[in-house]
Image: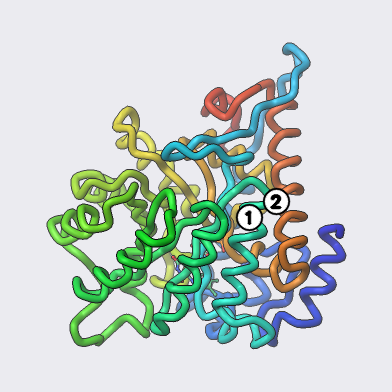
Amino acid sequence: MTYQELLEKARTCIGPYCKACPVCDGVACRNQIPGPGSKGVGDTAIRNYAKWKTIRVNMDTINENKTPDTTLELFGKKFRYPIFAGPVGAVSLHYGDCLNDVDYNNILVKGCAEAGIAAFTGDGTNPAVMKAACEAIKNNNGAGIPTVKPWDADTLKEKFDLVRSSDSFAVAMDIDAAGLPFLQNLDPPAGSKTVEELSDIIKTAGKPFIVKGVMTVRGAVKAKSAGASAIVVSNHGGRVLDQCPSTAEVLPDIAEVLFGTGIKILVDGGIRSGVDIFKALALGADGVIIARPYVTAVYGGAEEGVKCITEKLGAELADTMKMCGVSSLHEISGENILRL
Ligand SMILES: Cc1cc2nc3c(=O)[nH]c(=O)nc-3n(C[C@H](O)[C@H](O)[C@H](O)COP(=O)(O)O)c2cc1C
């Protein structure tokens, strides 16, 4: 299956909102929710995509001619590429009822594991979704990351029991889900947490804990003091707060403040090619999350589609590394890019 075939097939079944565009830049879906768009005026996903394009990569081919090593090690697991498929919840609402969350996660987790990477899975009001996602991760040797919403303490305890049964190598929380309508006004309340609350949650989870949805240096420092093992620099693709900066704009300062602390940094938002992945690593990320394009891949080609897009991204990354004269991910630095 080619990437073009995958897109064409996705267009036949991906519902009324997503157009499975040749490049997923946030324009066609803009502020369409339900659908994959952004909140409010809807320009945050567009800005996420556009800001990566203002960074250029520096070519240097006067080097030893060797195959670049694209592998990443995270929390004791080795991955073929520094790429993770992002968590996406309520897929039938946003992308049409050809798939539900359980089927979607089953395909995504398996496809990613077979491609040598790992998927984050989403969470929602239906408890069956997290249960099935954890089973899918277990069936794929723990190669997946359940992403738990910032629920109240009792609900979180139940979720973490499921997470433990999954043998996942890490767990995540999209702390920025505080901005999603379905999480607001719940009783007991869900959403924002203090550093103390987050610290207790991280201790209860008992696994490397990834805090997803950090957009400021202050937020990164708080996640660190709560005991996070990693953060995801993310604005949830513009879906939780109107008119955020792009993730490319805030990543360098966050990477600087966390430098040398051992905390891993992932980033998402509009990363659409291996060249973008290279830029993200040059700005200080250890790896990237890509969400919407993996939805297109699942709708357009199931596990095969997931493998197709992963191979495409991985090959682009390897090519960029070779052309910029770096042979491993650790060697990628600010010297390899030009920021306009
Ligand atoms: C329809 C939709 C549903 C999402 N659901 C979740 C979710 O359940 N949990 C989560 O952490 N992020 C969720 N996200 C955010 C993505 O994981 C990701 O942070 C965001 O889309 C930015 O990455 P992208 O530009 O590659 O899509 C969702 C995004 C979309 C478009």
Q: Residue at x 81, y 81 (%)?
A: 12
Mark 2 residue element = helix
**Which quadrant would the C terminus be assigned to in this image?**
top right
Q: Residue at x 34, y 31 (%)?
A: 259
Instruction: Classify residue 332 by image quadrant.
Output: top right
Q: Residue at x 71, y 20 (%)?
A: 60
Q: Is residue 329 above or below residue 240?
A: above
Pick the front one: 232 or 138: 138
Residue 2: horizontal and vertical position, in percent?
86, 58
Identify the amino acid type marked 2: Thr
> What's the residue type where badge 1 is placed?
Cys
Q: Is residue 71 visible?
A: yes
The residue identified by callout 2 is 310
Marks 2,1: beta carbons within 8 A: yes
Residue 123 position in % (x across, y down): 43, 73
Q: Residues within 10 Å of mark 2 (few under 14, many from 20)?
A: many
Q: x, y percentage for residue 209?
A: 33, 51
